Image (spheres, rainbow, N blue to C red):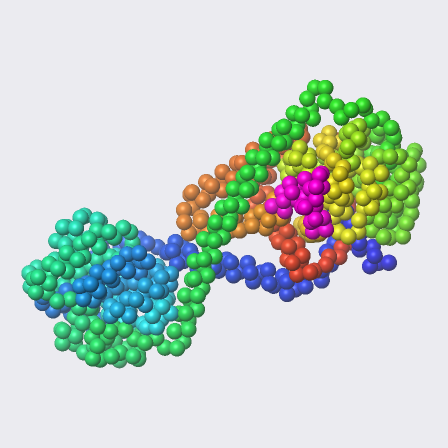
């Protein structure tokens, strides 16, 4: 018997989800997927150098601690034996260096020019760009060019901690290992230029890198191609004094490099005509008389094996060890996932965002039309409905609420009989109902079988052709029943949805639910009413033709949302379902987050069950087909799909605030909030509610809405993995019945 009692629940009185309803592995799987998505987005942001990245360029500073021989020396700085040593590029020799790549467009074109002119280049690469375009790096190495480290996120290392400096270098080396199977001993700092620009902030960085076995490379001549000054100026600025050697700076990424591409062939031709030769940094070191790789000799450098002493063009490169190779490949794989996932999700979420905004617009337009149509002077459904109706009150352990519920019904201005179906209560609910000695009240006792069985029993026992169904914790206003049954003057109408309101709205969680009921549920019902595809008659207040319910087979136990199930069944049977905005019922909403979670979890899961059960309506004809092809897609899109993706919209908003443009992202979020506020204010106006509750809306969007999304995701996981729900009745206080008897 105890196990059966767990089945008793309603949309207004939801049972408790058993602790084992969703096995732990499903929860772990969902959390791992969420963690994976967050990590993917963080990686994508880091790759784009938009998080945790201080890109400030050093201001003017003194160079008191920098040795004069370094400030006045050549552009190739190493630390053999721990002592700073500089080398110059040999006379009539050019070392072409390129910064900020690889770039999928410009780097390849630069290499085409170098290959056509049989000239090598030294490319200082940004690790995040290596990770995104490994094929370009492989081509650089395969074609005999040299590569160096330009940090992972193009950050000014002068401002960074020692740990950050090491991380920037190590991550770039891993990316190189994954892309081309090598590491390198060459380094160039972002925003660096000639030796005389080294200052007291950057010098310790070069010393630390030198101790790690790196050779830092500066320049003798800067083409300033990033300024796009024109081909002639680029060639002029890149040309050293006649006869002198030089390390020359160009860029193969970081913007429009069309002028660089135009100037580079002319520059190479000019220098060759003047008798210059071209080499790499390692080649210049060889020509200067140094042994290949001497700058890292005896040091704990970035790699130790694989140098080819007779190949000066590749002396700076080292074969990556096995661990670095696999770690690098894993990094590239993660980056590939991030590069595909984040833009793909962004596109999907853009569509979802447009759909959500379109829904807001459609709700406003249709709600306005519905209100004007139903409230215009002279509107009637037909002759006034005055015949008595049966009000069915299913009750299971409702001792706190049943007196208030029945007292509110006793004050009804419409003739009614009240049928209380006690579903095996153990708290004296039936005895309380009988002790009130109210007129026209019948109490029917049955063994505990669940709410659907109680309602079906009540329908069978009803004396009148129209039956009103409500929850045992709900109270009606005196005129509610009369307003609710008037649409039955139209013989084509089989059921009517009433206006359910939150009675216990004095708490924060109650106020949030009040906003949701007024803005979401009731605006939705106005829209669905005009579209002729109402998906749900609320369990707290609904009226039915008794004949229609019996013909549809009664309240089904196939799903956990019997109210949605019977509503769709009536559509499929050809009946119309409408909304009566003036028929108000006051229900007791869950008073804690735990109870709210259990309620909405069951609602969401039951709705999915009902939609799946009636999926064939999509191919039906007539009124059933209208629901299947209009109502069902709207419910799936706006009650399942968009809410499932909605948390990702919030995550992407945070992503944009952190990684892209905080101000623009914040303004976009506030704009969406403003749209929601407009919709909520209009809904409150239609329902003549007090606007002060809308002060809770921003907080509702930040907290309550996220909870509802998580509930829906939980339900989807349960449905997808074949889980089943168990529930018990939620705790009630009877607050609404006490405060609402006799009217609002």
Point out the stretch of residues depicted in magenta. 610-637
Residue 381 appears left or right of 33 = right
Quarter assignment of residue 212 = bottom left
Taking the magenta stretch, the answer to whether it contains residue 630 is: yes
Query: Which x, y percent locates residue 436?
Result: 91, 38
Quarter assignment of residue 692 = top right
Residue 606 appears in view: no
Query: Which x, y percent locates residue 57?
Result: 28, 54
Query: Which residue appears at 45% of the width and 64% of the height?
Result: 334
In the image, is residue 16 above or below residue 138? above
In the image, is residue 33 above or below residue 520? below
Quarter containing the C terminus: top right
Query: Which x, y percent locates residue 310?
Result: 20, 80
238 vs 55, nearest the viewer: 238
Residue 443 appears left or right of 207 = right
308 vs 381, nearest the viewer: 381
Q: Can you name the residue that lies furthest to the top here? A: 377
Quarter containing the N terminus: bottom right
In the image, is residue 197 above or below residue 505? below
Query: Which x, y percent locates residue 74?
Result: 15, 66
Residue 397 appears left or right of 230 = right
Residue 129 appears left or right of 227 = right
Query: Which residue appears at 60% of the width and 63% of the height?
Result: 29
Total numbered circles: 0
In the image, is residue 680 above or below residue 646? above
Query: Which residue appears at 64% of the width and 51% of the height?
Result: 712
Residue 578 appears in view: yes
What secondary structure is the magenta-colored segment mainly? helix
Query: Which residue appears at 69% of the width and 60% of the height?
Result: 722
Taking the magenta stretch, the answer to whether it contains residue 618 is: yes
């Amino acid at each position: 018997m105890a196990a059966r009692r767990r089945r008793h629940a309603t949309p207004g009185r939801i049972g408790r989800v058993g602790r084992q309803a969703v096995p732990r592995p499903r929860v772990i799987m969902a959390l791992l997927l969420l963690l994976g998505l967050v990590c993917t987005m963080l990686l994508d942001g880091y790759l784009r150098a938009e998080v945790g990245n201080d890109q400030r360029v050093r201001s003017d500073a003194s160079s008191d601690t920098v040795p004069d021989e370094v400030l006045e020396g050549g552009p190739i700085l190493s630390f053999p034996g721990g002592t700073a040593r500089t080398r110059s590029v040999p006379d009539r020799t050019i070392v072409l260096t390129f910064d900020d790549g690889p770039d999928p467009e410009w780097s390849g074109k630069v290499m085409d020019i170098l290959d056509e002119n049989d000239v090598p280049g030294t490319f200082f690469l940004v690790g995040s760009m290596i990770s995104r375009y490994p094929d370009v790096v492989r081509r650089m190495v395969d074609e005999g060019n040299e590569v160096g480290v330009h940090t992972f996120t193009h950050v000014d290392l002068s401002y960074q901690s020692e740990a950050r400096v090491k991380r920037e270098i190590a991550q770039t080396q891993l990316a190189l290992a994954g892309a081309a199977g090598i590491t390198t001993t060459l380094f160039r700092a972002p925003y660096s230029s000639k030796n005389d620009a080294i200052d007291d902030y950057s010098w310790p960085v070069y010393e630390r890198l030198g101790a790690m076995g790196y050779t830092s490379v500066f320049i003798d001549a800067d083409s300033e191609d990033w300024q796009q000054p024109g081909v002639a100026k680029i060639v002029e600025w890149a040309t050293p004094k006649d006869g002198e050697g030089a390390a020359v700076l160009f860029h193969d990424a970081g913007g429009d490099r069309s002028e660089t591409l135009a100037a580079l062939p002319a520059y190479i031709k000019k220098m060759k005509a003047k008798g210059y030769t071209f080499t790499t940094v390692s080649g210049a070191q060889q020509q200067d008389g140094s042994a290949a790789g001497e700058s890292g000799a005896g040091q704990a450098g970035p790699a130790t094996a694989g140098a080819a002493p007779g190949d000066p063009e590749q002396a700076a490169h080292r074969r990556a060890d096995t661990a670095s190779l696999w770690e690098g490949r894993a990094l590239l794989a993660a980056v590939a996932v991030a590069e595909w996932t984040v833009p793909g999700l962004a596109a999907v979420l853009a569509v979802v965002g447009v759909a959500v905004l379109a829904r807001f617009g459609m709700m406003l337009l249709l709600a306005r039309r519905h209100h004007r149509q139903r409230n215009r002077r002279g509107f009637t459904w037909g002759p006034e409905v005055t015949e008595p109706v049966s009000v069915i009150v299913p009750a299971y352990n409702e001792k706190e609420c049943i007196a208030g519920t029945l007292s509110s019904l006793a004050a009804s201005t419409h003739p009614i009989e009240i049928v209380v179906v006690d579903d095996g209560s153990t708290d004296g609910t039936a005895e309380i109902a009988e002790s009130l000695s109210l007129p026209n009240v019948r109490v029917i006792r049955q063994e505990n079988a669940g709410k659907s069985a109680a309602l079906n029993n009540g329908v069978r026992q009803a004396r009148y052709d129209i039956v009103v169904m409500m929850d045992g914790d709900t109270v009606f206003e005196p005129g509610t029943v009369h307003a609710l049954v008037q649409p039955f003057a139209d013989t084509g109408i089989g059921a009517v949805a009433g206006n359910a309101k939150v009675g216990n709205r004095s708490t924060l969680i109650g106020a949030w639910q009040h906003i949701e009921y007024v803005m979401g549920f009731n605006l939705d019902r106005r829209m669905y009413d005009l579209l002729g595809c109402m998906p749900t008659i609320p369990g707290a207040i609904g009226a039915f033709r008794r004949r229609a319910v019996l013909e549809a087979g009664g309240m089904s136990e196939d799903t956990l949302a019997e109210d949605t199930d019977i509503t769709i069944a009536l559509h499929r049977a050809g009946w119309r379902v409408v909304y009566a905005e003036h028929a108000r019922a006051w229900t007791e909403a869950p008073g804690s987050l735990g109870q709210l979670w259990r309620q909405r979890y069951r609602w969401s899961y039951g709705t999915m069950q009902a939609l799946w059960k009636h999926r064939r309506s999509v191919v039906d004809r007539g009124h059933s087909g209208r629901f299947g092809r209009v109502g069902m897609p709207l419910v799936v899109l706006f009650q399942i799909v968009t809410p499932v993706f909605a948390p990702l919209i919030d995550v992407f908003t945070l992503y944009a605030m952190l990684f892209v443009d905080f101000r623009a992202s914040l303004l976009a979020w506030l704009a969406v909030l403003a749209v929601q506020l407009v919709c909520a204010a209009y809904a409150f106006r239609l329902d003549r509610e007090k606007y002060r509750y809308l002060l809770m809306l921003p907080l509702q969007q930040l907290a309550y809405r996220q909870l509802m999304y998580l509930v829906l995701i939980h339900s989807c996981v349960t449905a997808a993995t074949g889980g089943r729900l168990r529930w018990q009745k939620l705790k009630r206080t009877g607050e609404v019945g006490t405060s609402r008897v006799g009217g609002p």
